[in-house]
Amino acid sequence: MGEILASLAHGFSVSLTPGNLLACFLGVFVGTVIGLLPGLGPVATMSLLLPITIQMDATAAIIVMAGVFYGAMYSGSTTAILLNIPGEAASVVSCLDGYRMAQRGRGGAALAIAVWGSFVAGTFGVVGITLLAPPLAHAALRFGPVEIAAVLVLSFVLVIQFAEGSRLRGAAMALLGFLLATVGQDPVDATSRFDFGTFTLTDGIGFAPLVVGLFGVSEVLLNLGHRAAPPSAQPFTSLRPTRDEWRDAAPAIGRGSVVGFLLGILPGMGAIVPTFISYSLERRLSRHPERFGHGAVAGLAGPEAANNSATAGSMIPLLTLGIAPSAAVAVLTAAFLTHGVQPGPLLVVEKPDIFWGVVTSMYTGNVLLVLLNLPLLGLWVRLLSVPYSYLFPLILVLCAIGTYSVASNAWDVVLMAGFGLLGWALRRLDFPLAPLVLAYVLGKLFEEALRQALVLSRGSFAIFVDRPVALSLLVFAVVLLVAPAGRRVITGAAAR
Amino acid sequence: MRRAGLGLALLVLAIVAGALALRLPVGAVTAPGPGLFPLGLAIALGLTAAALVVSEGVGDGTPAARAADPTADIPAAGERVGGGAAPMLVVAAVAAYGLALEVFGLVVATAALLLVLWLAIERFSVRRAVAVTTVATAVIWFLFDYLLRVRFPRGWLGL
């Protein structure tokens, strides 16, 4: 412990120099702005900034890139809560209850809970990196394609189980999401599938057109008929959460921090799976599960915390093993390599300035994010007092520009419009969107993991039984699936 | 009934996807090809969609089912703005905006979209629509083109 404290002190002496502090502020500021814009996520932004950071000192450059990464995660929930438009992938879950809180006039409180939950979880994650990085990284290495496929099966079961509406509709949406994920190149041998020879679909259906369309555009379409004050412009009663809201949020933030951190370490997870699992967990544990999807505080607080602690967790494989568990961390890896720094087990020994400088800058970055986001809450809230008749065309332009800016492809905007119509129809008919989005985002990873597992086992599904971790996860998934039916049978028998 | 209709659409999609997947190398479970996973998904989706059609289609005729139908208030196509026509119009306008961005550039395309939406959907007066469009387009240009340097095609007028 003494050694860790000494290392932290050294790290702060590096990260709190004026140059590195400025770099941290620049990173979190850019990340915050980018996180607000639907479509333009942290990966694209970090890629754009990479050439610029070549001119900078190695430590400062990596601090900037890391700041963009977790800054975007922090602010991505703002548009999700206020406008039902996720700023980035992991903010999708914030739309489910955060937006409903805004519709009830509790948007300010929702934003405040998101900011403080992110701060607590982000700090928890950085403490986790400090104390647990090497052993956790080695444990994560044991997760191969079999275990990854099993985790994903559990995630899908959880989401379908707790999606609004019937499970049959949830399952249909998940399968549709999987099918949409197969468009483009096969993840194993890059064979083109379902792209009809078009350039737009060569790399598959983009995340931005699908998610911005399904959530953002469909929300506008649903509100078109409202002639009275639109739901999202109800006067906000206060920016501060009430005592009851904090009482609901606090334990959810704690649980979300742990869930997000542990899952964020795993290869391929990113932040979206932890947020969905956290949401499902909170709904499971809640005494009022019927409130979820209608503005449940825990439904926002838990996933927001999971989102940010997963971001910190995903840095562990990079810093300790040199392995990038997600696309954003892969760009961060490029930042290291561009400056001649090899991330991995020797980083802490050979370049302690960089290792501890980056880790301690994350503590500082979390504080800066709170200082940056809290004063802006009132501004965001005031935006919604603008009459919806003025607001909705601007929202549509924002969605279109954000989607276009990802790949500068006009057909992405056309796709976004189409998905907007699909999302409008699905929501009117009470089909849940969460399973569709989760399946779409993770479809390629799941297919890759499943196919690799089958190649390893020479086509035998018994490999899922032979691996204890995978077996445990799958048994849990089966129990979740059959438990409600079993409960009904037992209740029926008891009644007779 | 409308949920059953969507179920039917999903069933058709599953059949088409399955047919397209069969054109790809399917391989075997020991060495899965690119077509195997989509084929499996298409079959699963087809079965699920069929179950949906049956479960949502049955009971449609009873008064209680009709009263409970959340789709009952969906306006028919062609109703006044705010009904079924408005979403179609908005979607068409946004799709056209995407294509117009590359031909006319950010400023002209954005101004055109905003004008159409404020005039046709919100029924603003021409004067009000033009005024608001001018201000909004200027702010959008400043924010995205000037400040954030997001790359847009310049269009015919170089804007």
Image: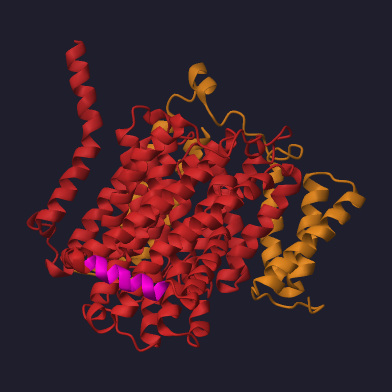
Chain colours: A red, B orange
Looking at the rendered image, the quarter that the C terminus of chain B falls into is bottom right
What percent of the width, then of the height, locates residue B1?
A: 51, 32
Q: Is residue A137 magenta?
A: no
In the image, what residue occupies the spot 87% across and 56% down? B130
Quadrant in the rendering for residue A243: top left
In the image, what residue occupies the spot 33% across and 39% down? A251
Q: Nearer the viewer, residue A345 or B81?
A: A345
Q: Is residue A405 visible?
A: yes
Q: Nearer the viewer, residue A41 or B72?
A: A41
- Residue segment shown in magenta: A4-15
Vertical relation: A118 (above or below) A279: below
Q: Is residue B88 left or right of residue A412?
A: right
* Residue that extends furthest to the top in the rendered view of this protein: A496
Quadrant in the rendering for residue A315: bottom left
The main secondary structure of the magenta stretch is helix
What percent of the width, then of the height, locates residue A147?
A: 19, 59
